[in-house]
Amino acid sequence: MPTQIQLERSDEAGAEVAGGLVEIRPDLAYRRLTMVNVLFFGEPSSKDWVLIDAGVAGSAGAIQESAAARFRDGKPPSAIVLTHGHFDHVGALQSLLHQWDIPVYAHPLEHPYLNGSRSYPSADPWVGGGLMALLSPLFPTSPIDVSANLRTLPDDGTVPGMPGWCWIHTPGHTQGHVSLWREEDSTIIAGDAVVTTGQESAYDIAVQSPAMHGPPRYFTPDWQDAWASVRKLAALEPELLVTGHGRAMAGTNMRAGLRRLADEFDSIAFPSDMRAV
């Protein structure tokens, strides 16, 4: 059975701009930092902008560098929005908050991992796929504590500082995982609900070959929820998909790959010991 859905380089979206960024919409850009993407919402001329996720530990300087290049007045963001609280999405958060005293928004089910009260489940190194899966028990699972800045995403589905966007609960990878959706131009910020480069293989991470994958297997405890979340995203028929890992992808082939992932998730995305034989 296949464990990934190949995409084409021609499906990649965006163009490189200043600050190490790839611009995928006039008001949306991302930067890959080590193994994970950090997103910047807001046009360069806008007065306010929002940071989406906060990268790995040690990346605060690179995030601020990109922000200064894109938003020339040097203002901090109006808010930070988190898709979830895993170490590679909040690694620079505390360092950034020392410089930027701003609100951090997350789903309430993620708050225990962001207020110091609960650790994530241990990684499963036996899910298959390569070296990164085997090394996953070394990845941090302990909570951070940003409770002084922590806020709950609004109940009405809006995203603070991001007019026209809504948040969608997409659990499975974590209980409080969210994705962001803008209907006007059919854009999804998927976090790790789906990714476009496999995270179990060190080779895949290094080469960044475009392929549609389910969430990183070693850190996904609820596969039925994860499957339902992928079906939810596929039903939106996005034009542009930007994920926490891998390049942003757009167009017909991307949509077909996302639909196939939703239809065949059990054989493509499930850990090796869960797949039907």
Image (cartoon, grey):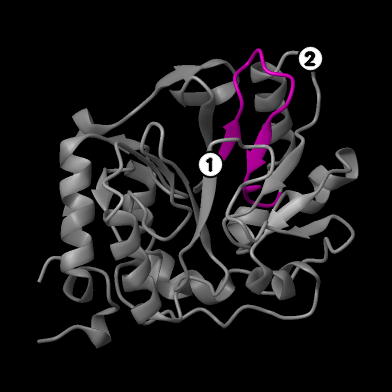
Q: Residue at 42% of width from left, 79% of height from top?
A: 125
Q: Position of residue 233 (x, y in %)?
A: 34, 56
How many circles with numbers are drawn on the protein?
2
Where on the picture, by quarter, is residue 146? bottom right
- What range is drawn magenta here? 38-57
Q: Residue at 62% of width from left, 37% of height from top?
A: 162
Where on the picture, by quarter, is residue 11? top left
Q: In this view, does 2 lie to the left or right of 160?
A: left
Q: Where is residue 257 in the image (x, y as percent from the top left)?
A: 18, 51
SS type, badge 1: strand
Q: Check the picture and name the quadrant holding the C terminus.
A: bottom left
Q: Residue at 22% of width from left, 43% of height from top?
A: 254
Where on the picture, by quarter, is residue 155? bottom right
Which residue is identified by label 1?
Answer: 165
Q: What residue type is labelled 1?
A: Trp
Residue sticking out furthest to the front: 156
Q: Which amino acid does label 2 sit on?
A: Asp
Residue 40 is a magenta residue: yes
Please rate how many residues cluster around mark 2, counting C-alpha atoms within 10 Å: few if below 14, some from 14 to 19, many from 20: few
Query: Which mark sits nearer the N-terminus, 2 or 1?
Result: 2
The label number, if any, that marks residue 128 in the structure image: none
Which residue is identified by label 2?
Answer: 73
Residue in the foreground of this view, choosing between 178 and 271: 178
